[in-house]
Image: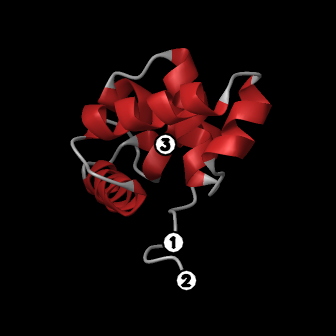
Amino acid sequence: MPRAKQAPKVSDAQLRTLSLQFNLAERETDVFRAILDHADEAAIAESLGVRDCTARTYTYRLYRLLSVNDRTGMLRRVAGECAALAKRGHPSFGGRGA
């Protein structure tokens, strides 16, 4: 099945900014990055050294924190947030700072 939405390319600096914006813990940020890289729960679990059900729990926690229902919603939310931060001139997103 083709992906409905391509993940925006997010640099490490942008990921830190988004993590602060969404108030993510360090482990949630790790899962967030993996999802943006299109990793499934099994791959996330393996990379974090946790069980699949734990990776799934982190994924659903991210959905709740970002007020979305699925990965497609998350990708749309991230793309929108990146665009908003760029428009406001955030340095990590191409702006010159506030």
**Colour theme:** secondary structure
Camera-side residue of 72 and 33 = 72
Secondary structure found at label 3: helix
Q: Is residue 24 visible?
A: yes
Q: Nearer the viewer, mark 2 or mark 3?
A: 2
Which residue, given by chain and number where applicable, does mark 1 sit on?
A: 6
Secondary structure found at label 2: loop
Residue at x 57%, y 20% (from the top left corner) = 27
Residue 32: percent from left, percent from top: 52, 38
Mark sitting on residue 2: 2
Q: How far is mark 1 from mark 2, CA to CA?
A: 10 Å
**How many residues crowd mark 2 within 10 Å: few (<14), some (14–19), many (20+)?**
few
| Amino acid type for the residue under numbered disc 2 | Pro
| Amino acid type for the residue under numbered disc 3 | Ser
Q: Is residue 79 above or below residue 63?
A: below
Camera-side residue of 33 and 12 = 33
Q: Is residue 11 visible?
A: no
Q: Tell me the quarter of the image containing the C terminus.
A: top left
Say whether disc 1 or disc 3 marks the residue closer to the N-terminus.
1
Mark sitting on residue 39: none
Residue 20: percent from left, percent from top: 38, 24
Disc 1 vs disc 3: Cβ atoms closer than 8 Å?
no
Residue at x 59%, y 41% (from the top left corner) = 33
Q: Is residue 62 above or below residue 24?
A: below
Which residue, given by chain and number where applicable, does mark 3 sit on?
A: 92
Say whether disc 2 or disc 3 marks the residue closer to the N-terminus.
2
